[in-house]
Amino acid sequence: MKVVTGVVGNDIHVVANRLIDISLQSRGFEVLNLGVNTYLEEFIDAVVEIDADILLISSLNGEAEGWCRDLLFMKQKYDLSKVIFIIGGNLSVGEASTEEIIPKYKEYGFDLVFHQVDLIEGLDEIENYVKENKK
Amino acid sequence: MSLLQRDRDIIVSNEYVDHFDFAEVEEFVKNASKDLFISHKFKTHKGKTLVQPRGGFPTYEKMFALYEQFKIAGVDVLPLTIDSHTRLNDYGSAAKMLRLSEESETDMLNGYPLINHGYRTTRKMMTHFNTPISLRHGTPDARLLVDMAIASGIFEIEGGPITYLLPYSKNFPLDKAFLYWKHVEKVCAKYSTLNEPINRESFGPLTATLVPPAITIVIQICEMLLSLEEGVKSFSVSFSQSGSVNQDIVTAAVIRKAARKYANKIGCEDATINLVYHQWMGAFPRDKDFSESLINTSTFIAAMVGADKIITKTRAEAFGIPTKEDNGKAVQNVQYTLKILKGLPNVVDPEEEENLTRCVDEIFEAIFNDPADTLWRKIFNSIKKGIIDVPFSPHIINANGVITVRDKDSNIRIYEKGNLPISEKSFQFERSKLNLGNDKKNIVNEIIKDIGVML
Amino acid sequence: MLIDIGSTYFKVSTQNKISHFFRDFNKTIYDDLIYKTGDLLQKYNKDDIFICSSANGGLSTLIIGLTESFSLKYASNIAYNSGINIIESVLYQHIEDYAIPSDTIDVVIIVGAVNSVENVFDDKLLKYIKQVDYQNIVYVGSSSQNQYLSDNIDNLQLLGNIMSEKLKLQEENLKNYLTNLYQEDIMGKEDIKALYDITSNQIYSTPYIVNRSLPYIDTMLDVVDPFLVIDIGGATTDIHYSTDLVDDNILSENEYDRLVFKKLGVYKSRESLVFTAKNNEFVYELLAHLNTTENILEEYSDKATAILMQLAIFLVLYKVSHSHNKYLNIKLQTLNSMVLTGGITKVLSNNQIEDIVAFFYKKILNYTTYPKIVVDKNYAIWTIGMKQK
């Protein structure tokens, strides 16, 4: 399974990004890590060029909303129907609850949404989801 | 006119620079008090670990007040930390933020915008305190900064093309950084002929996240060689507290010997090499008393290894930029601890030293074997090939093949070596200290624990 | 003896004396060259004559790729740095919506997807290509498509993927191919082929020559990195810029990259230059500053040419500034030097050039100063480039 990952926008959270990279590799995923400070267009384009199965975007400064509204529009540019879109990290600036955040991001076009979830727990859930989807 | 001077003339004719008078600056450096030169202080204070904190505020007044606090606290070397806009050569934004900082009571910059203040103003402060000052920044292109700093009376310049780029930048072209820092070295070498030498210092901590000592040492020595070959006569190699006392002692022993060996190899026997130790650069505990304990342990280690200089932290490290009071207190505490530490044993670990030395030599052999015709290009190619690989670097050129974890004594060990050209013997030595079995999934858990080892 | 064949004139350098001659378009390049420099040519061995060319507006390419951020960007970067002047890009997914280029294309480049990806291209690519008039066609995308494309496209050259599995740039093969394009057996480039009667050395494109001179530019000119070179020609305007002036994630071997503005030439592309000028919001202030009115844009005089050249300088800086998002964003505030080269150095004075750059920096960037300007009157850049091995 091929995964494109990275941290979006003007984030410099290198450590989290690298830990996700190593984790995914240790679970047998083939990882293309675009690093920090990556733009949505680059993520989508990378998914297209390597025919990735999963796009996992990290956003750690709570400002994801600003840019990810464009996701639906981008999804129309190419045929990405078989790609699983995942976003994780710290997804809001204020005190919004997980119950509010998750549906909002699903509407933006993400299949899985993790707000302030532990890394290992999140990756376990992703692995399960992928297994389910394969069936 | 030399090419170097031609370049300097063009570089200082910048929107934000107020007529740079090279002749006057040379006169100033020639006649400057020896007390401003850290290279001189190293010589006259042999056996003492000089204490240097970190700090920088946007306005002249706050900077001045900080220095007063530091002097009262008994500081040996003053820091001048440059703000992040200036580090990216964005003097326009720095100017704006400086104005705002001066008008309101809030600091809109995380350091001192030296270019905007100018050297004439800054020099007044530096000469007033008559203490060596060290320039701390993180600038890929420091060509304007170096002339400005020296003109201001700052006679130690920290940084280098690798140590100031790989930990911080995603895509600033590394080859350009090498060339820009060559300019910095040449300028420092030139000023060094006038009075005491200008000291250069490489930034040892790098990403401060599980960096294996072999890589730290190789990078330090690379930057040292690139500096010495331009005529710099005084250079400080450095590293930060690793989290294992023994590993720090071994690193210090190896870096001292290796730095001397490689400096002599390029004909620089007359260059002075100093050792600088950074207190813990990773995540600090939120409990301030625990933080003070942590700081104390690192002071102890600095004394054990006989570091020529120690860069200090404060008890408020987990909370952002410290107040000048916190900062001053930290300096006092460190001076006290250093004062009372007597009768320190000489600890040597021959087996670890041998392994670390072997790793360093193996990596250098690969670097020197690169077919490029200049040293900087050999090093540049080595980074591209992953022969030099810094864990957790955000830079697109970094190979990201090395994975490290701690062993049971908290030593940082190489778990995956990526493209590091270390022999099977060296690699097996590292792996033999680890007990991780083949559960790769667990590796990340270990790494997370190891990163937060002081929490 | 060094010879440069441009779109408007020849440049000839012997024993450090440089002369130029306007081209006679009623003759072939070969005949024209013999007619104007025959005596000179006799004095040199074929070994000692070096020729470069950007004749007829330079080499052109059509790039068909999968995405803007990777395949198209990488191929364009390699193409510009190899000396290609005109690049048309096509996003493969929407290939049916693109018009067929009307001119003959020197080389079509097909690129996209890493090697492990299959079923990238299909019929619609073949349909489109059949309608294009091209001299050469190369494939630098996923190797899984090699068979399919070779079987269905005549004379397709397979050069290997320019992207690694990790989307890193692998430029060598395509770069070498494009650099040597004049040397390749090109049908229809009779003009150039004939020149191999005069020289036994490889003929390169002029932009490639200029590009390779840049790391040595400070040996002949007072230039400090980071710098910008602006070459305003008859057909296009070229810029070369230091890589630290842009925020880019391409890891290439170049210290300097190149970009071409095909609508900003002062002779062949005069109309499009005028059109671009009229559409710029600052054009009237600019013309007022130059003490003239927009009527000058319709004139055909020496004075009008000079004004157009000054406009071209302003417009190219504008296009790469933060005010304009379509192209590149070059950090003009950190520029240390700006070099002007090309035909413009024979028309405008240093003052005229400094004046317009100062105007730009004041108006657009709010700076009272501007980078050090060097006017390459003696084609130093070209000379350095030609003399590199």
Image (cartoon, helix red, strand yellow):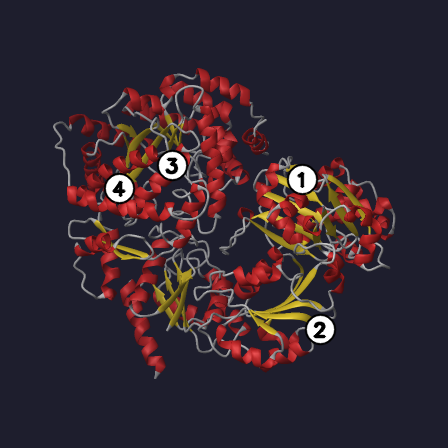
Label 1 with label 4: CB-CB less than 8 Å: no
Q: Where is residue C259 in the image (x, y as percent from the top left)?
A: 63, 54
Q: Position of residue C246 (x, y in %)?
A: 55, 50
Quadrant hosting residue C68: bottom right
- The answer to whether C333 appears left or right of B362 in the picture is right
Q: Where is residue B329 in the image (x, y as percent from the top left)?
A: 26, 30
Label 3 and label 1: CA atoms lie apart by 43 Å
Residue for badge 2 = C133
The residue mark sitting in front, 1 or 2, is 2
Label 1 and label 2: CA atoms lie apart by 46 Å
Residue for badge 3 = B225
Count residues near mark 1 (Cα–Cα under 10 Å), then give few for <14, some for 14-19, many for 20+: some
Count residues near mark 3 (Cα–Cα under 10 Å), then give few for <14, some for 14-19, many for 20+: many
Marker disc for residue B280: 4
Check disc 2 and give the amino acid type.
Asp
Where is B340 relative to B371, above or below?
above
Label 3 and label 4: CA atoms lie apart by 26 Å
The residue mark sitting in front, 3 or 1, is 3
Label 2 and label 3: CA atoms lie apart by 56 Å
State whether residue C285 appears in this view. no
